[in-house]
Image: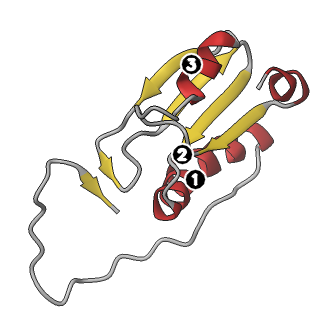
């Protein structure tokens, strides 16, 4: 991560961001002097998302699950890239009605 922080404005990592025995992103970020802005969000998929900063460098640690990576990229990384590049980046958003009622089992935002 040291090399990436020296060469890049934004570092994007996938996997290893939760709290298991093989999840090293948080420790590696801390060891590199990256300050944690937040770790874990109340959403599904993508709860163990990490975001930190070192000076003007941004570090995103996305979960390892493919749907979590994609969701977190679209919701957090893409807007950050748009701001960094001062370009409109984004996805076309659609609102569509559900065919039937849906009740959430957890108090998390669902994507």
Which picture quadrant has residue 10?
top right
Relative to 86, 48 lies left or right: left
Q: Residue at x 24, y 83 (%)?
A: 97
Give how far across and how far down residue 111 sits, in percent: 35, 63
Q: Residue at x 43, y 76 (%)?
A: 94
Q: Residue furthest bottom?
A: 99
Q: Residue furthest front?
A: 21
Q: Which of disc 1 and disc 3 is earlier in sequence? A: 3
Which residue is the site of mark 2?
Answer: 76
Q: Secondary structure at mark 2?
A: helix
Q: Secondary structure at mark 3?
A: helix
Q: Answer whether labels 3 and 2 touch (C-beta < 8 Å).
A: no
Between tags 3 and 1, which lies in front?
3
Q: Secondary structure at mark 1?
A: helix
Relative to 96, 11 lies left or right: right
Question: Measured along the vertical axis of the image, is residue 68 above or below residue 91?
Answer: above
Which residue is the site of mark 1?
Answer: 73
Observer-nearest of 13 and 53: 13
Question: Measured along the vertical axis of the image, is residue 102 above or below residue 106?
Answer: below
Q: Residue at x 70, y 45 (%)?
A: 81
Observer-nearest of 6 and 19: 19
> How far apart in space, not on screen, are marks 1 and 2 (Cα)?
6 Å
Observer-nearest of 94 and 1: 1
Question: Measured along the vertical axis of the image, is residue 27 above or below residue 42?
Answer: above
Q: Answer whether labels 1 and 2 touch (C-beta < 8 Å).
A: yes
């Amino acid at each position: 991560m040291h090399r990436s922080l020296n060469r890049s404005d934004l570092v994007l990592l996938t996997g290893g961001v939760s709290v298991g025995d093989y999840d090293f992103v948080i420790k590696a970020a801390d060891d590199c002097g990256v300050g944690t802005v937040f770790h874990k969000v109340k959403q599904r998929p993508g709860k163990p998302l990490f975001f930190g900063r070192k000076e003007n460098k941004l570090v995103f640690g996305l979960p390892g699950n493919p749907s979590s990576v994609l969701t977190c990229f679209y919701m957090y990384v893409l807007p950050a890239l748009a701001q960094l590049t001062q370009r409109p980046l984004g996805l076309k958003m659609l609102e569509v009605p559900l065919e039937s009622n849906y009740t959430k089992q957890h108090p998390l935002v669902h994507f």
